[in-house]
Amino acid sequence: MNPLLGIYAAVTRRTVDGKNPNGWIPEQKISVEDAIKCYTINAAYASFEEKIKGSIEVGKLADFVVLSEDILTIDPVKIKDVRVDMTVFDGEIVYEEEQ
């Protein structure tokens, strides 16, 4: 599962075959911010873990990624091309893209 592709799909509603450039059922598009919340704090809430994960706060697990671009500011169509530059799990770097 690739959360960036999920966010891309939720925001653009485009299909991978390119047949729906304006989005499949475009009225169901959501904002990038809402899509991020679906993969973070809302997912943590759904699993009754919002007190330990889902947002970056003191006392919570330090699990997060650093992306190659700010998905809140780029054209949503480009979200599918964003790379993960670093992954931090339990406060430790577990992946770092070679520069």
Image (spheres, rainbow, N blue to C red):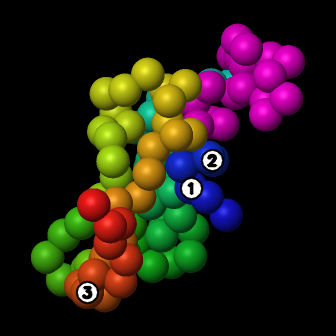
Please provide the residue range marked out in magenta.
8-27
In terms of depth relative to the viewer, which is nearer, 46 or 24? 24
| Residue underneath mark 2 | 6
Instruction: Tell me whether the residue at label 1 lies in contact with that at label 2, contact meaning CB atoms closer than 8 angstroms.
Output: yes
User: Which amino acid type is marked by label 3?
Assistant: Glu
Sequence-wise first label, 3 or 1: 1
Mark 3 crowd level (few <14, some 14–19, many ≥20, 10 Å Cα): few
Instruction: Tell me whether the residue at label 2 lies in contact with that at label 3, contact meaning CB atoms closer than 8 angstroms.
Output: no
Q: What element carries label 1?
A: helix
Label drawn at residue 3: 1
Label drawn at residue 92: 3
User: Which amino acid type is marked by label 1?
Assistant: Pro
Residue 18: say if magenta: yes
Sequence-wise first label, 2 or 3: 2
Location of residue 72 in the rendering, given as x and y in whole percent from the top left corner: 34, 33
Location of residue 93 in the rendering, given as x and y in whole percent from the top left corner: 28, 81
Above or below residue 37? Residue 30 is above
User: Which amino acid type is marked by label 2?
Assistant: Gly
Location of residue 74 in the rendering, given as x and y in whole percent from the top left corner: 37, 26
